[in-house]
Image: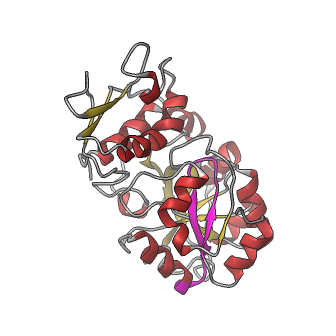
Amino acid sequence: MSATPQEAADALKAGALILLPTETVYGLGADAGNPQAVAAIFEAKGRPRFNPLISHVADAAAAAEIAVFDAAAQALADAFWPGPLTLVAPVRDAGRVCDLARAGLDSVAIRVPAHPMARAVLAAFGGPVVAPSANRSGRPSPTTFDDAVEETGFAVAAAVDGGPCQVGLESTVVSVVDGRVALLRPGAVTRAQIEAVVGPLAENGEGRRSPGRLTLHYAPDAPVRIEAAAARPGEILLGFGPGVGETRWSLSPSGDLAQAAARLFRLLREADRTRPVGIAISPIPATGLGEAINDRLRRAAGFVG
């Protein structure tokens, strides 16, 4: 049964975990300033503790109380918030986001989500909520309420049903530390959109500041094979484009990248439930949103660090 935003906020205030819908994926939420609650997230997910968590807040003013925003950070916040963009900036108030949530770093990852139910919970709670994807660590992120409950529902005191996630991929993560703007994790806000606001991005080796950067991440139980022209015996092919594979398993029959992003994790999970020999993925163009899709696919296959 779905909880109301107020019931979810009350659970957070009591130090409990919640399932939180966002426009990107469902999150496993906790009070960002409560180390015991944050530790419970790591326990429920089986997540390495060196990986920082994203703090979700109700608006940009709340974000500015927690993080130090330079001109570039403010410009990106103005352009893309509320929305699927996370900014990694120097922490201003370390008490609001505990050391464990920041993985001991002097920076904080922060975002204003666009989902109305998420914003209602955040407004009722009145503080930052860390909410990494509500999957067990390494598995595909849940983009429906039922999948979130199946993954980590055992650990929560309240679960908010916000319907299917519209974006279906985790947020873009951009570092705005030390006067440099760098893309740490691609997502629905594309590289081109970011550069249209702040100019060319810097090369940056600060991946440790970003969540979701494990070599094997977003992976189903079945092995994943990418850039596949066709399925091998026993595999399911997740196709892309007209006439590629079965319609049931197509990421997008029309070759639409936004549709492919929204369907990716759900189809990975559904294919995995059939216990195939493997899951093959058709080639996805690397332009625009395709950069984020290919990033998730390479990690699902264990190819990048």
Q: Quadrant of residue 49?
A: bottom left
| Residue lying at 54% horizontally and 58% vertically, measured from the top left | 148
Q: Work out whether residue 134 can be spotted.
A: no
What is the x, y in percent for residue 132? Answer: 51, 63
What is the x, y in percent for residue 83? Answer: 65, 47
The front one of 193 and 49 is 49
Q: Quadrant of residue 279?
A: top left
What is the x, y in percent for residue 80? Answer: 66, 44
Q: Is residue 226 left or right of residue 31?
A: left
The front one of 252 and 248 is 248
Q: Is residue 39 left or right of residue 214?
A: right
| Residue lying at 69% horizontally and 78% vertically, measured from the top left | 11
Q: Is residue 32 magenta?
A: yes
The front one of 165 and 99 is 165
Quadrant of the frame with the N terminus: bottom right
Q: Is residue 254 left or right of residue 111?
A: left
Residue most extreme to the top: 243
Residue most extreme to the left: 233
The residue segment tinted magenta is 17-36
Q: Is residue 61 above or below residue 288?
A: below
Q: Work out whether residue 74 can be spotted.
A: yes
Q: Is residue 124 above or below residue 241?
A: below
